[in-house]
Amino acid sequence: MTGVVQIRPVSERGISNGIWFGILLFALLALSPTLAQWTGETYLLTLIMKAMILATAALSLDLLIGRGGMVSFGHAAFLGLGAYVTGIALTEGISDVITILAMVIATSGLFALITGAISIRTSGVHFIMITLAFGQMLFFTFSSLSKYGGDDGISLWDLPELFGTRVFQSGHGLYYSILIILILTWVFLGRLADSRFGRVLRAAKENELRVATMGYRVYHYRLIAYVIAGMIAGVAGFLFACQAEFVSPATATWPRSGDLIIMVVIGGMGTRNGAVLGALFLVLTEEILSSYTRDWRLIFGPMLVLIVLFTKGGLTGFLDLALGRK
């Protein structure tokens, strides 16, 4: 019946296609260090690590935008929060990975709970603006931490240790740690999206009033999603600090939030693979274009516009069309 919201699982075919493509994508990422060693292009690994970290954050943002219809313009605040908790912990002599990750998740979750409880009471442009305001508030807080570098940020002279091993000091160790966390995030968010929780979240995006009439507490579902997304982005901030060996207030700025939104949109909203593809595309394309011209943004901007206009469903939709899945 027209207008009725149905809370049902995604089709078997769609799930299967997404899983197999994801497996192929992660297999290529796992082989990248070996391929880079053979070709001598080791610098590419740094770019791919950055892309995978941003893909983890983009996956968490896709939970809000693609699944819940909540466009957050302050999501980079959680990225910066995770990075700063990591930097401050290392500066104060805490080096255990498990301890630092627990601090990052707890801090990011608490910040998401407090700000989400306020933000989710709004919608549309008001939600966008209030999340932007919270993000800017955190950015100025980081900039005012004179003990930890202020505007100059924090240089990390050492990296976390896992059970006494220096796995994060190793290039390949750090690479595969980032990849494992990305895969775990991909699997977790896929299971979450296919669960009853995820179906209610998607249904509320289509028609909030009907879902509320069915007895579901939409506000609570959205708040839980917001907290989960904040914690995952905080973990991405932890990885960002480890990879860059530097923490800066710039990590939490609104342009970084804009980058994450672009990754979700051009990759394909509501698809796990889309966030990963969008992050890889954005990071690698920026690097390639900037190596040819200083005015690379004049090329990159129209390219993004064309992708959004002519590829229904972003890069994921384009690949589905090219492979005859649509």
Image: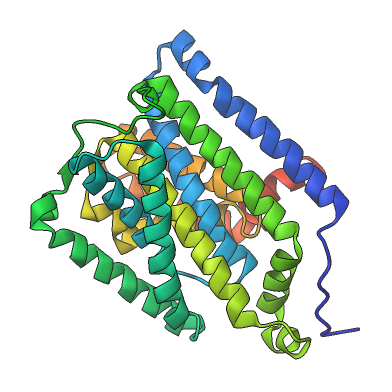
Q: Is 9 placed left or right of 263 in the picture?
A: right
Residue at left offset 42%, top offset 40%: 98
Task: Give above or below for 160 relative to 165.
Answer: below
Q: Nearer the viewer, residue 28 or 216?
A: 216
Q: Is 93 placed left or right of 267 in the picture?
A: left
Q: Quadrant of residue 64?
A: bottom right
Q: Is 5 placed left or right of 39 in the picture?
A: right
**Does residue 73 show up?**
no
**Does residue 63 show up?**
yes
Task: Give above or below for 117 relative to 105.
Answer: below
Residue at left offset 59%, top offset 81%: 219
Give the percent coordinates (x, y) of residue 155: 17, 39
Give the percent coordinates (x, y) of residue 91: 18, 42
Q: Quadrant of residue 50?
A: top left
Q: Nearer the viewer, residue 147 or 270?
A: 147
Task: Give above or below for 259 relative to 273.
Answer: below
Q: Residue furthest left?
A: 146
Give the percent coordinates (x, y) of residue 10: 81, 59
Residue at left offset 70%, top offset 65%: 198
Q: Quadrant of residue 290?
A: top left
Q: Residue furthest top?
A: 38
Give the percent coordinates (x, y) of residue 63: 58, 61
Which quadrant of the rendered structure holds the N terminus? Answer: bottom right
